[in-house]
Image: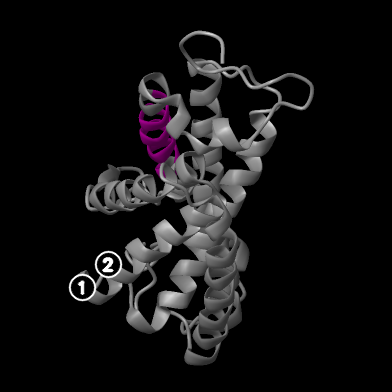
Amino acid sequence: MENLAMHISNGIIDGPVAAVFAAVALLATTFCVLRGRRDLDDRLAPMAGLVAAFIFAVQMLNFPIFTAGVSGHLLGGALAAMLVGPWVGALCVAVVLVVQALVFGDGGVAMLGLNITNMAVLGTAAAYLLIALLLRVLPRTPAGLGVTAFVSALVSVVVASMGFVLQYQLGGTTDLGGNLGGLAGTMAGVHLLIGIGEGLITATTVVTVAKVRPDLVYALRGLRAASTPAVPVVGGAR
């Protein structure tokens, strides 16, 4: 179980597969840079820095998963997607992963493309797709925003873990004897529990920000209900 972590260490996946996903991560982050430029303004630019710093700080705090003998921490994809959008959000998570790999040795440098693909790209994309869906059917109240943040964070963690399962199937350095289903089940179960913790942290953070400064929550600004105008979380009529 110690090797079944989201921060993939050097040697877990072979070189050719790691190189392919390094290219995937590079292409994805380049696309995010190009799209993210459209969103950057006087509010989003400093908010992106704060989000990246917050994710970096919270990722240093681990909470134990007693049933599996491992610990989990915030991945940050859903939090970043809600506060600064999918493009800038993915870049925030990617920057955190690069600093962790280069400075703190958390995740192998050779595996950086794999980790960015899973946590920054897949995790953030899955989160934002759910955010876009849920905010069109749930009321834009603190409760509705909290449910959206919780569900999107939980699902994003599990999706990111399934990215690792795919990568391990393609280039894992240890033969599992064809037991890919066992690996997928183990990863999904552990990261479902981690996702609950991430969901609580994400929901608490997003609702707190929305109550004080709803204009700083990208999901409330960037998304509009299908048939009704946007309603602020708190305060008077917009």
Residue 209 located left or right of residue 150: left
Q: Which mark is residue 103?
A: 1
Whole-percent x and y of residue 157? Answer: 49, 49
Residue 1 located left or right of residue 85: left
Q: Secondary structure at mark 2?
A: helix
- The residue under the point 54% across, 61% down is 121
Residue occupied by mark 2: 100
Which of these two is toward me, 197 or 233?
233
- Residue density around tag 2, few if under 14, some if 14–19, many if 20 or more, within 10 Å: many
Quadrant location of the N terminus in the rendered image: bottom left
Q: Is residue 160 visible?
A: yes
- The vertical placement of 36 against 79, above or below, is below
Which of these two is toward me, 104 or 155?
104
Asked whether 151 falls inside the magenta stretch, the response is no
Q: CA distance from mark 2 to mark 1?
A: 6 Å
Whole-percent x and y of residue 77? Answer: 47, 50
